[in-house]
Image: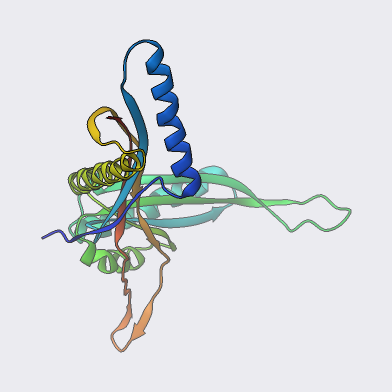
Amino acid sequence: MQRREFLIGTAAAGAAGLSGCLGTAQQATDTAAGDGDSGRTVTVTGSAEMQAAPDRAVIEASVEATGDNAAAVRDALSTRSDSLRQALRNAGLDDDQLTTGRFAIRPEYTRREPGTEPEQTGYEGTHTITIEVDDVDTTGDVIDTAIDGGADSIGRIEYTLAESTRESLREDALKAAVDTARDEADVLAARVDSRVVSVQQLNAAGGGLSPTYERYAVAEDAAGGSTELQPDDVTVSASVEATYRID
């Protein structure tokens, strides 16, 4: 079962914010009095965050090659990346989980000395494969498979959430943000001897997904190299801006 935790529910507050909101309410009262409408409004913001264990990981695995010309590097990268992909397929990953993240071939030069021009010595290239892992607990095993399959480096490891999990957590965060905004509106209305009677406008004002990242590390044991990872929780946030009518 997906673990989720409510972390924060905050709204616009503080003395300066309070006086500003009260000033807005009073200005609305004065304006309304001129056209015969006694309605007043107060505008507040509320925010909330939800945390959950990640249920998806994204790994960047790269192969590298050098050669006398760009075509030789291209061919070497093609051969090495095909071998890496096949190793990952043999481990049970599907082709739609393996995409090209970066492909680059560039000239290679000697180190430039003062007063001299660098000399080209050949070409070097990198082909990065982005690996999407649906079972976070197998992330370390997938990294080991990539290394054994020929990967020269493991780059960023991103822990995130599946779309359905993300949307569910955002809905929970939005509900909490709306509740927080309403509580703040009640406090402000009470300060001017009023009460909230209805909501006039409600907008989602911001928020999003904050994935966590980890650098690659290898722990040596008697059986050889193995990757041990301990991902942090992922945060989903939401904020709202609400305008309430008070009397």
The extreme front residue here reads 193
Q: What residue is shown at x 37% (from left), y 10% (from top)?
A: 35
The extreme top residue here reads 35
| In the rendered image, the vertical position of residue 44 relative to residue 10, given as above or below | above
163 relative to 111 in the view: left or right: left
Residue 122 pos. (x, y %): 63, 51
The extreme left residue here reads 1
The extreme right residue here reads 115
**Residue 135 found in image quarter:** bottom left
In the picture, which quadrant includes the N terminus?
bottom left
Q: What residue is shown at x 30% (from left), y 57% (from top)?
A: 234
| In the rendered image, the vertical position of residue 141 relative to residue 50, given as above or below | below
In the picture, which quadrant includes the C terminus?
top left
**Most foreground residue, 131 or 20:** 20
Residue 211 pos. (x, y %): 35, 54
Q: What residue is shown at x 44% (from left), y 30% (from top)?
A: 24
**Most foreground residue, 6 or 200:** 200
Residue 130 pos. (x, y %): 35, 50
Residue 194 pos. (x, y %): 29, 36
Q: Is residue 174 visible?
A: yes
Instruction: Give the number of callouts.
Output: 0
**Most foreground residue, 4 or 96:** 4
